[in-house]
Image (tube, rainbow, N blue to C red):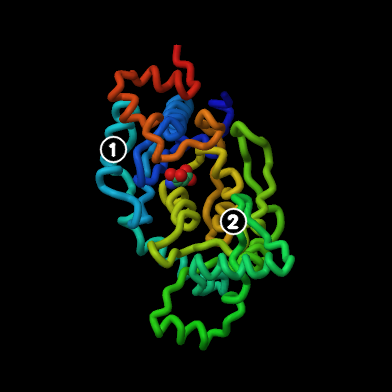
Amino acid sequence: MAEGSMHAGNPQRPPVFRFAPSPNGPLHLGHALSAILNHDMAKAAGGRFLLRIEDIDVTRCTPAFEQAVYDDLAWLGLHWETPVRRQSDHIAHYRSALDRLIGMGLAYPAFMTRGEVKAAVAAAEANGAVWPRDPDGAPLYPPADRKLDEPTRASRIAAGNRHAWRLDMAKAVSIAGDGLNWQESGDGETGTIVADAGAWGDVVLWRSDAPSSYHLSVVLDDALQGVTHVVRGLDLFHATAVHRLLQRLLDLPEPLYHHHRLILDGDGRKLSKSEGSTGIAELRGKGFTPSDVRRLVGIVTD
Ligand code: GLU
């Protein structure tokens, strides 16, 4: 394991690590690995360990799941600083960053529903087009809304048309300029990684069904909380390109990144929150100890 191989920039200030779960289901072994790594790496570096509750998705996050996060982490023997930052308490902060991007001409209202996007992509593919996809395999947002003129946008918003806000990626990449990269010390590719944000297309900055978006709130909170080391799963490796782009556009500092291996199920798939068998609470109920969990996720303590 590459613990201890990340170097913090400022020798005067202790490094800051964070575990940032979304309380939309029970924590499983993948979360345990992430939380324990952050906690242990912070401790080894004489740093701080923060817990952040990423609960902007009000349709899926619940107070019961949030309480379960605290219970599971405490049972694992982890100690975090309080008060805990809960994203749902800071929507105005994310909104002001969105307004700044709108003011820079980099965000536009996107009116197409998921169904409409699907239909547009299917129609293009039926005609033999190869529709571009993002690193997670999702089709990029069609360009139509990016081209709407201001009066059309204003009248559709005034008429109450449901919309998200998306980043105009081509414009954002050209304003950000060359040399966008990040320093990586995780379990995949390491060293200086070129940040190809353009591969994600016009990402969502503000959802139509929930305030803010993962990308926007995560970079704002990491900056506001002084996070120096982002330690999280390899499933977020490529998303880091978007985060580096937003950090540059919004003049935010650049943390170091460490994307750790994922815990897979018996079929080689990433664990999901619906799989009770690897849930931390379920293991606790079956009589497993915190040391057993450390062993199960491959962290050797003795
Ligand atoms: N909230 C995200 C999740 O639960 C993690 C975000 C991050 O660590 O950057 O998957």
Q: Earlier in the sequence, mark 1 or mark 2?
A: 1
Which residue is at 42% across, 67% downward? 208
Image position of 150 with respect to 168: above or below: below
Q: Nearer the viewer, residue 10 or 224?
A: 224
Which residue is at 29% across, 29% downward? 74
The residue singled out by tag 2 in the image is 138
**What SS does tag 1 mark?**
helix
Report whether 58 appears left or right of 120.
Answer: left
Task: In the displayed orientation, state which residue is furthest to the front.
Answer: 126
Percent of width and height locating residue 190? 66, 35
Which residue is at 31% across, 32% downward? 72
Amino acid marked by disc 1:
Ala
Q: Quadrant of the N terminus?
A: top right
Question: How far apart are the alpha carbons under marks 1 and 2?
Answer: 31 Å
- Residue 68: which disc? 1
Question: Given contact means CB atoms under 8 Å apart, are the residues at marks 1 and 2 in contact?
Answer: no
Report whether 10 appears left or right of 19.
Answer: right
Q: Is mark 2 within 8 Å of ligand 1?
A: no
Q: Nearer the viewer, residue 28 or 202?
A: 28
Percent of width and height locating residue 132? 68, 60
Disc count in the image? 2
Q: Nearer the viewer, mark 1 or mark 2?
A: 2
